[in-house]
Amino acid sequence: MITIQKALTDLKAVSYDFKKIAKQTGFEEYGDMSHLEVDYDNAEQVFYAHELNSIIDKIDDMVHRINYLNRPVCQTTTLHKNSNGRFETVSGHEYTCGSGIECLIDDDGEQEWVWASVEYSDRYYITCYGNPPLKSGMTVRIRG
C-alpha cells in the first residue's frame, strides 16, 4: 500500500514529464498542440491531433490539481458576505463566479473537504453535492 504523500510526490514527478511535452507541442504557450506536425488532408492524423489535444487538456487539469494539492494550507477561515454581495474571507479573499474553492461540506452527517468552483445563478453556490449555496459561516481553506 502507498501513502497519500508518496502518491502526491510520484504524481508531481509525472507532472514534470507533462511540462516537457506541453512545451514541445506548443500547449504550454498556446493552450493547444499547434506545434504538432499534422497533415490536415489526412483524416487519420486529424483524428489523432484532436484526440491528443483532448488528452493533453485533461493532463493539464491534472497537473494543476497536483500542484494545488502540493501547496500548504495557509489559512482556514469562514466566509461572510461583503458590501458587494460577494463572499469573502476575513483576510479579504473574495470568491466570484468561476473561482475555485476548498470548503468543508456536511455530507449526510460526515464532514468532508471538497474542491469545487463557485458559480452564480440567482445565488452563489458551489459545484458539488447538489450545488449547495455559499453562505456566511461556511469554512474554507486557502493554500499558499
Image (spheres, helix red, strand yellow):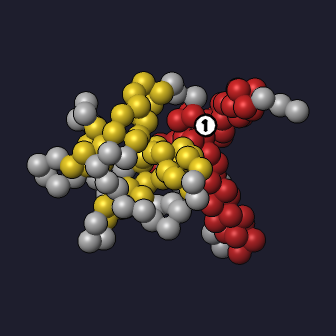
Name which residue lies at 34% across and 56% down.
134
* Res 50 → quadrant: bottom right
Q: Residue furthest right?
A: 1
Name which residue lies at 36% across and 34% down.
77
Q: Is residue 14 visible?
A: yes
Q: Residues within 10 Å of mark 1 (few under 14, many from 20)?
A: some
In the picture, which quadrant includes the N terminus?
Answer: top right
Compared to 91, does 81 lie above or below?
A: below
Compared to 56, does 141 lie above or below?
A: above
Compared to 17, does 105 lie above or below?
A: below
- Residue 36 in percent (x, y) is at 63, 52
From the viewer's perspective, is 72 left or right of 6? left
From the viewer's perspective, is 125 left or right of 110? left
- Residue 101 in percent (x, y) is at 42, 46
Name which residue lies at 50% across and 67% down.
130
Compared to 132, does 57 lie above or below?
A: above
From the viewer's perspective, is 82 left or right of 18? left
In the picture, which quadrant includes the C terminus?
Answer: top left
- Residue 33 in percent (x, y) is at 58, 53
- Number of numbered discs visible in the structure rendering: 1
Say which of 50 and 113 sits in front: 113
Residue under label 1, please give it.
66
Q: Residue furthest front?
A: 109
* Three-letter amino acid code at the position of disc 1: Ile
Say which of 51 and 67 sits in front: 67
Name which residue lies at 28% across and 66% down.
123
Q: Is residue 24 visible?
A: no
- Residue 102 in percent (x, y) is at 46, 43
* Res 7 → quadrant: top right
From the viewer's perspective, is 142 left or right of 106? left
Indicate the secondary structure of the residue bearing disc 1: helix
